[in-house]
Image: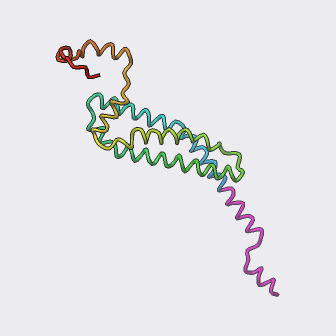
Amino acid sequence: MPEALLLDQLESVDRVVESLEKIEGILRDNARILGRTAEKMKGTALAFENAWRKIITNVAQGKTTPMQAARPGLYSDFEKRLELLKQAHALLTRFQNQGWTDLPDPDFLLPEIAGMEGLKARVFDPWQSADDLEDLAVRDYSLTTADLDQIGPQRRPPASWYAEESKPF
């Protein structure tokens, strides 16, 4: 009699097993979606590096003000993507630690995360003002030897430099 009361209160084992199997199936499906989504994030660091190069070019063309105005939105997107990379890595690691081998190795995201963190430290952290942006753009603007050869003859030092008697170096 007490066993019957207990069994009435508990779901049947079959229904519990069926529910757990459904949950496991949903988790596996979501884990696969996570794996595919994470693989699509390859190249994120390069994409933001390329965006930085375009910003540098725009600053060199005298478009500092619009580039500075775009910083908050760009930085927000950057932070969101970096956080997504870290979350994807953590989730894939958790699934991998549970023995799910049909997912990509989470460590493929580590170079992306490192690249983004490097860009953050090198560019986004020091870039607060328009003056900062111009300083960073000068630092990162790449001129080839051919560019310098073309610019050099057009940009002679001031005559006062030739008349200078002191030795600054």
Q: Which residues are magenta?
A: 1-26
Quarter of the image with the C terminus in it: top left
Residue at 52% across, 40% down: 114
Q: Position of residue 103 (x, y in %)?
A: 66, 45
Q: Is residue 26 above or below residue 3?
A: above
Q: Quadrant of residue 107?
A: top right
- Report the magenta stretch's main SS: helix
Residue at 37% across, 14% down: 146
Query: Could you tell whether 28 is left or right of 136 in the image?
Result: right
- Whether residue 21 appears in magenta in the rendering, the answer is yes
Quarter of the image with the N terminus in it: bottom right
Q: Quadrant of residue 153?
A: top left
Q: Is residue 62 above or below residue 126?
A: above
Labels in figure, total = 0
Query: Could you tell whether 47 is left or right of 27 in the image?
Result: left
The furthest residue to the front? 166
Residue at 44% across, 47% down: 79
Residue at 53% across, 46% down: 85
Query: Could you tell whether 34 is left or right of 50 in the image?
Result: right
Q: Position of residue 110 (x, y in %)?
A: 57, 41
**Which residue is nearer to you in this view: 96 or 167?**
167
- Whether residue 7 appears in magenta in the rendering, the answer is yes
